[in-house]
Image: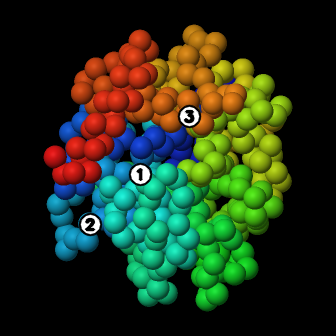
Amino acid sequence: MSVLARPLSLRSGLTLPNRIAKAAMSETMATPGGEPSPELEVLYRRLARGGAGLFITGNVMVEPGGAGEPGNVLVRPRKGPPLEAFRRWAAAAASGPGVAFVQLNHAGRQSPRSVNGAPVAPSAVPLRLGGMFVAPRALTGEEISALVGHFAGAARLAQEAGFSGVQLHAAHGYLFSQFLSPLTNLRTDAWGGPLENRMRFLVESLRAVRRAVGPRFAVSVKLNSSDFLRGGFGDEEATVVARTLDQEGVELLEISGGTYERPAMFVAPRDSTREREAHFLDYARQIRGAVGCPLMLTGGLRTPRVIEEVLLEGSADVVGLARPIALEPDLPMQILAGRTRASAATPPSGRLAVLAAATEGGWYHEQLHRMGRGLEPDAKLSRVRTLMSAARTMWRRAEGG
């Protein structure tokens, strides 16, 4: 049996039928009230046919104030049901051979002014990107404790809805990532300062989630290997955090990197890992030496040969594919059957890579929306027209239209 087709059993007892995961991509397909939409069901029923062993949803924000984009699915305080929209989404995602996790997140300061005019963060450190973001207000200790409870409640909702697990998003500059970074966490209380305190919000949330869902429900984390910012959260601290999460019983640790300011998750690196495709492979190797839990590697992977090499060398136990699956939803099945050499999706590189990544992101986003409408992806879509259309759609959603 190919290493790609081997099942993987997690600590909770859940088994992934193969080693290919559909990594999280922000879908922004919620209803105006923030619930999973019928389009999300259609999208995930289509993706489920593609054969991946694990499906991780895009951002599900644990409370309305944590939204990062118009159209994010939101978990609102509730006294009980309704859960039907989440149940239908879970059933759609699990309609194929794979299992499905909900990615739980809070944007913190990475919430544009068009979405949130009063964002919160560990500290009042603004995100300076062309005036798109309002300077955040620092959270109080009581508010941080309440957010820990929100993550636990959202995980319980995912479990009740029928998902197989959750992923806490502690990468890409969102709220957990903001707490981990010494550039954005300037606190002097128990939630800031030394790394032990900066990781406390993530560790406490992980513990609260585990208490809420019990031992037979999968709990995973997506962690930055580095923010790639001078003086920020780097690989040595990431290794310490990874070791702590492993000791806390995390079942699957996804390795990623970058923030809105340095979008390394979308741009091909210039060093030797470019030839190996895997953007964060060297970081995964470093973390592999410190933890025993399964690792998932996402970013740049597109050929079966390299994917299999990564798994065979033991640097990762699961490979995550995001944009390749958005363009070719049957890619996992084709890879497992040995019917493809490479994905048509390639990460941008070169001097204009960051600008290209932004344009490409909207293009891949539209492929997801096509599938949500019952259509197939279209590789011939115009990049420019897609970007303009996406901008208009987000503007209308931000204005409530």
In the depicted structure, whether residue 145 falls above or below residue 100: below
Q: Please state if 180 lies on the left or on the right of 71 as rendered.
A: right
Q: Give the class, few, some or many, for how many residues have Cα within 10 Å of label 2's Cα (few <14, many ≥20).
A: some
Three-letter residue code for mark 2: Arg
Q: Earlier in the sequence, mark 3 or mark 1?
A: 1
The part of the image, by quadrant, that contains residue 304 is top right
The numbered mark at residue 59 is: 1
Can residue 230 be seen here? The reply is: yes
Q: Where is residue 375 in the image (x, y as percent from the top left)?
A: 28, 20
Q: Give the class, few, some or many, for how many residues have Cα within 10 Å of label 1's Cα (few <14, many ≥20).
A: many
Secondary structure type for disc 2: loop
**Residue occupied by mark 2:** 76
Q: Earlier in the sequence, mark 1 or mark 2?
A: 1
The part of the image, by quadrant, that contains residue 177 is bottom right
In the depicted structure, whether residue 342 falls above or below residue 229: above
Q: Give the class, few, some or many, for how many residues have Cα within 10 Å of label 3's Cα (few <14, many ≥20).
A: few
In the depicted structure, whether residue 356 falls above or below residue 113: above
Q: Where is residue 271 in the image (x, y as percent from the top left)?
A: 82, 34
Q: Nearer the viewer, mark 3 or mark 1?
A: 3
Can residue 165 be seen here? The reply is: no
| Rendered residue at 54%/58% (across/down) | 128
| Rendered residue at 26%/66% (across/down) | 76
Q: How far apart are marks 3 and 1 (CA)?
A: 23 Å
Three-letter residue code for mark 3: Leu
Three-letter residue code for mark 1: Asn
Q: How far apart are marks 1 and 2 (CA)?
A: 14 Å
| Rendered residue at 46%/68% (across/down) | 135
**Residue occupied by mark 3:** 355
Whether residues under marks 3 and 1 lie with C-beta atoms below 8 angstroms apart, the answer is no
| Rendered residue at 36%/51% (across/down) | 69
